[in-house]
Image: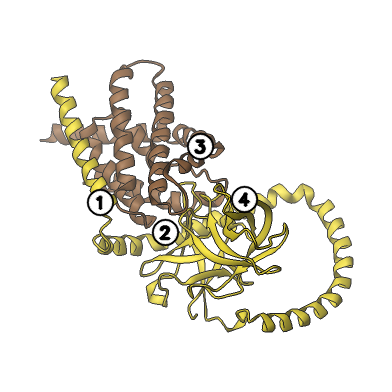
């Protein structure tokens, strides 16, 4: 009897596994779309509420945890404020200079983008740090491959799946992400790739090109999918690629992707 | 009917919680697998065939909610369920006082198996890294944290789910007696 039971169990397990393998490798696009649309329609209000609730709880605990540090922070902030006031004047001059340089470098004018603001409603729970879910979808004009930025022109990733009211954003740190970038200071070109949510690597940089630690990495606009001049991060370390044919640089992203609340999808390119 | 609705609702909410609530707090790449832990608790205490349907539904919900290729989480969940059920049939002796501690070991095994399958699939799907390069990312420090969090979730959910099972069993007995 136990033997018979085990074999029935094994048969069921084998059948289900075989179907899963078939679906996973064959990956039929569109077969599950109706189910997915219905599920996401039902799930959307829950996802939004859960994410907002989580954010509120997190902020409350962060606030409570920081009360003890507030006195010291306050004194430090007063000192910082004094020095920042003097910096503002010099930065205004730098801003004028920046505007001129952006124009000369033909960087994308950030204020000309048609931006769709989206709240983050979910994140990758599997630990590979590869995607975010946002609360806007095809009904708001979101399409696949649209770039996603945070307000001040920092590239976060691009849309890779679209539902009616929600979309999935493939983050730059995801293992499947690859975007053309360049070094702002030296114009060295390369490809930025994700490393399973751990960080970014600027790869395929020719040995003859110059890279320096601390340089700023921006999108190069090659390929036409992502506009030129969006900020990606800063070079932390430079090394040779394993095959010694190219240079690689470890790039520190400008934002913590796990802490994002609001992102913007660029609808016009 | 009522039982199906309650179980379906538990799986639905745990899936949503895993994607939209817990990542806010667990920003170190180690979000606990709530749905998987729930399925592990059920499968360790029940018959494989009776929980298989819910294992598939839980996996489907996880795949659909996270826009992943359908089949990935279903396969991971069903494999974990199969292993946990086989081990629990062998090691979980009824009325044994240390049942809870054996279940802890089963949760550790289930988490490792699930992580291995997800890591393997990420390696297959990843364009920028090889299959075997992906595995260390899923068994680094983050894995031990995930293990810890899953055990925490297990400790929180074990008794409420046991209580729920008893309520379902009581209701089923009442239905049988009425008939």
Disc 2 chain ID: A
Disc 1 versus disc 2: nearer the observer: 1
Tell me what residue is drawn at x 61 percent, y 57 percent.
A256
Q: Percent x, y for residue B123?
A: 42, 46
Return the residue at label 4. A240
- Give the camera-side residue of A30 and A82: A30
Return the residue at label 1. A23
Furthest-left residue in view?
B179
Q: Is residue B102 left or right of residue B55?
A: right
Q: Which of the two labelled residues, at mark 1 and mark 2, occupies the earlier sequence position?
A: 1
Quick one: SS at disc 1? helix
Tell me what residue is drawn at x 66 percent, y 51 percent.
A62
Position above or below: A241 against A97: above
Q: How far apart in space, not on screen, are marks 2 and 3 (Cα)?
A: 28 Å
Chain B's colour? brown
Question: Is disc 1 on the same chain as disc 3?
Answer: no
Within 10 Å of disc 2 (Cα), the crowding (few <14, some 14-19, many 20+) is some
């Amino acid at each position: 009897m136990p033997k018979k039971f085990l074999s029935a169990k094994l048969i069921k397990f084998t059948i289900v596994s075989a179907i899963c393998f078939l679906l996973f490798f064959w990956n039929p696009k569109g077969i599950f779309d109706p189910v997915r649309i219905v599920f996401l329609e039902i799930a959307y209000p829950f996802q939004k509420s859960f994410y907002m609730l989580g954010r509120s709880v997190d902020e409350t605990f962060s606030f409570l945890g920081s009360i003890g540090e507030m006195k010291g922070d306050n004194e430090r902030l007063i000192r910082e404020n004094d020095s920042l006031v003097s910096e503002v004047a010099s930065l205004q001059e730098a801003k004028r200079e920046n505007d001129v340089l952006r124009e000369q470098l033909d960087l994308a004018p950030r204020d000309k983008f048609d931006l769709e603001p989206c709240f983050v409603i979910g994140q990758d729970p599997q630990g590979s740090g590869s995607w975010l879910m946002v609360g806007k979808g095809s009904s708001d004009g979101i399409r696949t491959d649209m770039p996603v930025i945070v307000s001040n022109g920092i590239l976060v990733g691009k849309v890779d799946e679209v539902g009616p009211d929600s979309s999935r954003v493939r983050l730059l740190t995801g293992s499947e992400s690859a975007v053309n970038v360049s070094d702002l200071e030296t114009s060295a070109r390369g490809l930025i790739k994700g490393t399973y949510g751990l960080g970014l690597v600027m790869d395929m940089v020719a040995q003859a090109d110059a890279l320096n630690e601390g340089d700023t990495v921006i999108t190069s606009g090659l390929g036409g999918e992502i506009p030129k001049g969006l900020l990606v991060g800063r070079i932390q370390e430079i090394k040779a690629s394993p095959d010694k044919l190219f240079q690689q640089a470890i790039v520190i992203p400008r934002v913590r992707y796990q802490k994002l609340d609001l992102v913007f999808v660029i609808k016009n390119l | 009917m009522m039982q199906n609705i309650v179980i379906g609702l538990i799986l639905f909410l745990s899936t949503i919680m895993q994607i939209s609530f817990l990542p806010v707090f667990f920003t170190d790449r180690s979000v606990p697998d709530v749905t998987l832990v729930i399925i592990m608790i059920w499968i360790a205490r029940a018959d494989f065939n009776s929980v298989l349907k819910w294992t598939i539904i839980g996996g489907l919900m996880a795949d659909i909610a996270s826009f992943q290729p359908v089949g990935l989480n279903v396969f991971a969940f069903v494999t974990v369920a199969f292993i946990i059920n086989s081990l629990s049939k062998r090691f979980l002796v009824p009325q044994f006082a240390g049942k809870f501690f054996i279940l802890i070991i089963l949760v550790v095994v289930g988490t490792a198996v699930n992580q291995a399958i997800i890591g393997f699939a990420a390696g297959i799907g990843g364009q920028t890294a090889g299959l075997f390069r992906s595995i260390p990312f899923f068994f680094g420090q983050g894995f031990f944290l995930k293990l810890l969090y899953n055990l925490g979730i297990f400790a929180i959910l074990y008794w409420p789910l046991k209580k729920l099972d008893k309520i379902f069993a009581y209701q089923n007995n009442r239905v049988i007696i009425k008939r």
